Amino acid sequence: MADNQRSLVIIKPDAVQRGLTGEILARYERRGLRIVALKLEVVSRETAERHYAEHEGKPFFAGLVDYITSSPSVVLILEGPDAIGVVRTMNGATRPAEAVPGTIRGDFGLTVGRNLVHASDSVESAAREVGIFFDADAALVYQRAIDPWIVEA
Ligand code: DAT
Ligand code: MG
């Protein structure tokens, strides 16, 4: 039985500016993933630097923080069986030029500096990232009537 997991997802400023928020959310929803928290916000520099702490010191770090703080993002938590790997696969390779068609980056992106989406890469990262963006009680626990048609009991 697959592990029920949560992934912290960011629909980045380029995707919001390009009017792709609905398209991207619709893909996650159609896959069967459940949205358990969601907000629109301009990510602060402090939050961006915490979120991307593993990349501090790399040549692209300043540009990455400028990009992610430049305009509103949609930040959400997705839940479902193996959600972390499922969302990473749906997002596609970090470099959109290498992302396969059918993935979000492979359908809408061209360059690594405008790669549309973020998703947690492990259970540990997800817990850390959820804690950066959301209060402890922000994720809602609820069932959808369709859930038994997506995940067997
Ligand atoms: P991912 O977002 O697929 O988890 P990552 O964690 O390695 O990728 O990097 C975080 C973000 O940093 C990535 O979405 C885009 C940016 N980035 C990574 N490598 C880069 C590079 N070589 N040049 C410019 N930006 C880069
Ligand atoms: Mg990453």
Image: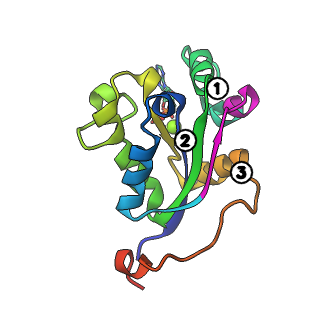
User: Of 66 and 55, which appears nearest the observer?
Assistant: 66
What's the distance in space between the residues labelled 3 and 1, CA to CA?
A: 17 Å
Tag 2–tag 3 contact (CB < 8 Å) = no
Q: Earlier in the sequence, mark 2 or mark 3?
A: 2
Q: Position of residue 75 (x, y in %)?
A: 59, 45
Q: Which residue is mark 1?
A: 69
What's the distance in space between the residues labelled 2 and 1, CA to CA?
A: 12 Å
Type of residue at label 2? Ile
Type of residue at label 3? Phe
Which residue extends farthest top? 59
Which residue extends farthest left? 101
Q: Position of residue 78 (x, y in %)?
A: 52, 57
Type of residue at label 1? Thr
In the image, which residues are magenta? 37-49
Q: Indicate the quadrant containing the N terminus: top left, top right, bottom left or bottom right.
A: bottom left
Taking the spot 36% from the left edge, 74% from the top edge, the residue there is 150
Q: Which mark is residue 13?
A: none
